[in-house]
Amino acid sequence: MKHTRKRISIYNQNVVGYAFILPWLAGFLCFTLIPFIMSFVLSFTDFNILSKSTRFVGFDNYIKLFTEDKLFLKSLQVTFKFAFLSIPLRLTFALIVALILNRKSKAVPIYRVVYYLPSIIGGSVAVSVMWRSLFTKAGVVNSLLQAVGIDCQLNWLSNTKTALLTLVLLYVWQFGSSMLIFLSGLKQIPLSYYEAAEVDGAGKVRQFFSITLPLLSPIILFNLIMQIINGFMVFTQAQIITNGGPVNETLVYILYLYQNSFKYYEMGYGSAMAWILLMIVGFFTALVFKSSKQWVFYENNASGGKKKKGKGGNPD
């Protein structure tokens, strides 16, 4: 009887647990796993949204991307340039602001909210429209430059040399989420480390490079991975602010993928592009993880990821 009651109790607990995760599980299956599998299958077809028939074309879509589609290579070039410019700047600004806010002050919570706010609204259409108006010929940016004595009549969005820069600045402006993660990591570093360093005569710069950066390296790794993913998936800003112009200088990869899939209705071709992007992001993510053994420091492993071995081949 006791065993029967115990089994019923365990069964009821399992049912309750499955009931709680059912909404997430249904969402994962409907909006993630099934579309994931479908996009892989469609990437080997000539599926067109307006077409009634779909043919299996094998690797033709992938071959066309690398051999015939010049805009594909252009979009890759623009995306790489955007990512390699914006990601280091965004992380740098996030870390600098986190260091500034990592102090005891009654106003610090207000500053945290102010700096985090752009991350909440930065990806919206309204902010993109506002950003586009800032960099027009008669926009606020040129007015500010003229106010300080710089005669600037440049239309930043129609200039091939500055159009991408405006998107980079908007992306860097949204550093709030990375800043909060850095700030939480800074709070975990014991003050006794800095006190001991001061006793030994280490200055602020030496403390930063010898204590702060090593102990913050796992947080830097996490933020770097997240920004690599987000940097390669930028879309709203390029779509609203420049729409890929001028002369495709801001045609980022996701925007070109969107155009092929929903403007030209070539969903099979767009699916192939999506899988190429997945492999690119996966490659850079794996590369960062592989290199992390050399520069990420964990408190329980002072060698930064590699355990030293004794004479017998066993860890010390």
Image: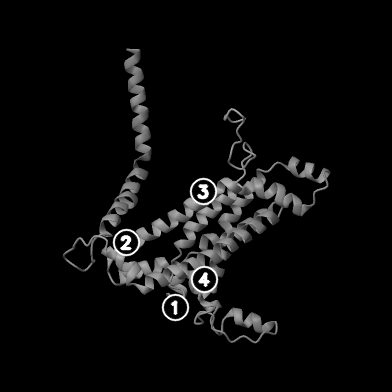
Q: Nearer the viewer, mark 1 or mark 3?
A: 3
Which residue is depicted at the point 56% across and 45% down? Answer: 293
Mark 1 → mark 4, Cα distance in angstroms:
12 Å
Q: Nearer the viewer, mark 4 or mark 3?
A: 3
Q: Position of residue 50 (x, y in %)?
A: 21, 69
Q: Is residue 180 left or right of residue 278?
A: right
Q: Nearer the viewer, residue 175 or 297?
A: 297
According to the picture, the residue beneath numbered tag 1 turns out to be: 245
Q: Nearer the viewer, mark 2 or mark 4?
A: 2
Q: Quadrant of residue 6?
A: top left
According to the picture, the residue beneath numbered tag 2 turns out to be: 272
Dot 1 or dot 3, earlier in sequence: 1
Q: Nearer the viewer, mark 1 or mark 2?
A: 2
Which residue is depicted at the point 32% across and 45% down? Answer: 26
Q: Which mark is residue 290?
A: 3
Mark 4 → mark 3, Cα distance in angstroms:
30 Å
Which amino acid type is shown beneath numbered disc 3?
A: Lys
Do the residues bearing badges 2 and 4 touch, measured as CB atoms within 8 Å?
A: no
In the rendered image, the residue lying farthest to the front is 311
